[in-house]
Amino acid sequence: MKKNLPLKLTSILFLFLSIIACSTEDGTNGLDGMDGIDGLNGTDGEDGLNSLVSTVPEEPGSNCTNGGFRLDFGLDSDNNGTLDPDEVTSSEFVCNPDPSNGLTSLISTVIEQPGDNCTNGGYRLDVGLDINNNGALDVEEVSTSEYLCNGDSSDFLYQSYASLISQTGTNDPTEQVVENSLNLNISWARQSQGIYLGTLDTTIDISKTVIFFSTPTTHTGVRGTLESSNQIRLELQNGVNVFADNFENLSFELREYE
């Protein structure tokens, strides 16, 4: 049989439930939800770019009253092994002094081994005046040096061909190979005074290949270019637009990146 509660008892019960519902005391925290699914890995970044330097004779003018050399620096954006005009980010001028004092400005490029100056190695550019007029930049004649350092070697995977090249008289250049993970051979031929062509016995991917070289102490500048997938051209100067033979131990390296 259904019983009805008295009105007074019902009112008291309603008031009691309202007080409980409005209590300021926090309830028990719920359980943590499950971790969400990890997001997808991002796309790998592109390979870093190589730093390059180019030495160009500077004719007498507003930059150098008596002429000299311009050093162009930049990144090889198109990976063709050559510092193109649109890749140059900075330039420095090495000017000849007043010819009345009989001194000439010289530049020497030396391979810098990994160390304090360049963690992963690179090149050192020495600049100074030929005080003793022997045509070479001696150690005591260096007035300033600049370092062009390689990037982190872990960022680059490559195979290389490295050698020391020498040449005398009108003979073809000879070389001493010090590394050859590319497993190729280069035959060097003298084209004309100070200009030499190296022919590879196998082809390389020119879009992924870079050449490095140093300037012998007997010369003021070197220019190297990849002529094709199996030919390299070297030009050695000893003065403004003066090509010259006879040099020893020019450091040369050919790198093909993966």
Image: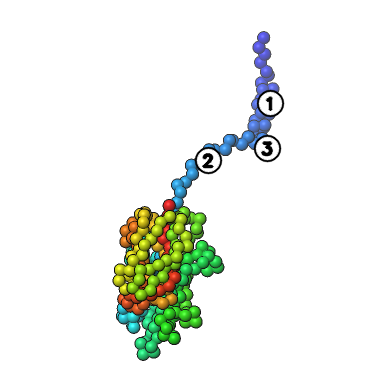
The reply to whether dot 2 and dot 3 touch (C-beta < 8 Å) is: no
Report which quarter residue 177 is drawn in: bottom left
Q: Which residue is mark 1?
A: 12
Q: Amino acid at mark 1?
A: Ile
- For marks 1 and 2, the one nearer the N-term is 1
Q: Residue at position x 36%, y 62% from top?
A: 187
Q: Amino acid at mark 3?
A: Glu
Q: Residue at position x 33%, y 73% from top?
A: 170
> Residue 25 bears which disc, if any?
3
- Mark 2 lies on a secondary structure that is loop
- Mark 3 lies on a secondary structure that is loop
- Binning the other alpha carbons within 10 Å of mark 2 as few (below 14), some (14 to 19) or many (20 upward) gives few
> Residue 38 bears which disc, if any?
2
Mark 2 to mark 3: distance in Å?
37 Å
The reply to whether dot 1 and dot 2 touch (C-beta < 8 Å) is: no
Q: Residue at position x 38%, y 74% from top?
A: 168
Residue furthest to the bottom:
100
Nearer the observer: mark 1 or 2; the answer is: 2
